Structure formats: C-alpha cells, structure tokens
Amino acid sequence: MVSINNIKKYLKEKLSKDRYIHTLNMSELATKIAIYHKIKAIAKIRIASLLHDCEKNSKNGNNHSFLSSKMAKHKFCITDRKILDAIKYHTFGHRNMDIISKIIYISDMSEQSRKFKEAEQIRKLAFKNLDEAMLLAISTKLKYVIQDRKPVSLEGVILYNKLIKTVTGNSNG
C-alpha cells in the first residue's frame, strides 16, 4: 500500500498552506470517527482523507473530487474502489456511499476549520450516529448550493431522500 509519508510530502508541495492544514485536520477527524465506530479500514480512511482534495488547486473547481480520484489512481497507483469512491463522492455525495465514503464526506464538511454554523453539530453527530450526521451534512450542502444558485447534484438529492428514509423511517421521500 502507498506510504502515508509520501502522500503528505506530495500534498505539502502541491496544496496551499490552508488546504494542506484542512486536509490534515480532516484526516485526523476521519480517523477518530472511524476508531470511535470500530471501523477496521483505518488505512483506507487515512489514504482517502489525505487525497480527497489533492486536485483542489486545479482550475476545475467542483470537479476536483473526480480529478482527485483519478490522481490517486495514477500518481499513487491506488486501485482500491472504496478509497477511490470515497475521494470521488466527497463533494456531491452518491446514493450508494459506503461507511468509508460517509466518514470522508462528514469529516470534510465538519473538520475544525469549517466555520459555517452546522459544522460543529455535524461533527458531534458523527460520534453518535453516522447516518444522522450524513443527513445533516448533505442537507446543509444542498441548502448552501441552492442558496448560491449553483447546480444541484442529482446523486446528492437521491442520497438525501435515501437518508430521510433510513433516519426517520419515512418512506414518502
């Protein structure tokens, strides 16, 4: 498996200082959440969390999650689908996110440098119930995207509806 130190060295050279700090904070939070929930895939979570924004400084803005997944595959020879999907879906979400992808999404939305009002609540929920934290995270993301009059990801909406059913038991979503 790829070396965490090699990834950190690459990111420190490639990312802005603020983005690098965000990445380290996010990776630390993701690891803590995984340990709390007794997830055994800690190495996968660490790799995905470190590489989630490796293409954030590219000129492709919101496509950075897809580009970061490709970079992880080509630059670091990562072939594990769970890692690549967690990186790919950390911005928009996806209807079939596994626990690794959810932890990466939640951690990215709520790491300590995030200043929007829901970030702390998402972070606290992540240590109680991952689906509830995920529901708050995706609904917060959708709210801000709509307020900014940006396109809404269909996968994010499908994920939201799926989580509503899971968390509330409401099958009308």
Image (tube, rainbow, N blue to C red):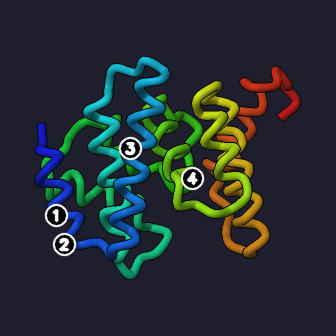
Q: CB of mark 2 within 8 Å of CB of mark 1?
A: yes
Residue that mark 1 sits on: 10
Specify few, some or many for label 2: CA neighbours under 10 Å numbering under 14, 14-19, or 20 or more: few
- Give coordinates of residue 120: x percent, y percent: 65, 48
Q: Who's the residue at 67% across and 69% down the image?
A: 151
Q: Farthest residue toward the bottom?
A: 59
Q: Earlier in the sequence, mark 2 or mark 3?
A: 2
Residue that mark 3 sits on: 28
Q: Quick one: quadrant of the C terminus?
A: top right
Q: Quadrant of residue 74?
A: bottom left
Q: Earlier in the sequence, mark 4 or mark 1?
A: 1
Asked if residue 158 can be seen in this view, the reply is no
Residue that mark 4 sits on: 109
Residue that mark 2 sits on: 13
Q: Earlier in the sequence, mark 2 or mark 4?
A: 2
Q: Who's the residue at 30% across and 63% down the image?
A: 54
Q: CB of mark 4 within 8 Å of CB of mark 3?
A: no
Left or right of 8 in this view: 162:
right
Q: CA distance from mark 2 to mark 4?
A: 24 Å
Q: CA distance from mark 1 to mark 3?
A: 18 Å
- Give coordinates of residue 56: x percent, y percent: 38, 70
Above or below — where is 111 with respect to 36? below
Q: Who's the residue at 75% across and 75% down the image?
A: 149
Q: Earlier in the sequence, mark 4 or mark 3?
A: 3
Q: Quick one: quadrant of the N terminus?
A: top left
Looking at the rendered structure, the kind of residue marked 3 is Glu
Q: CA distance from mark 4 to mark 3?
A: 13 Å
Q: Nearest to the eye among marks 4 and 3: give it.
A: 3
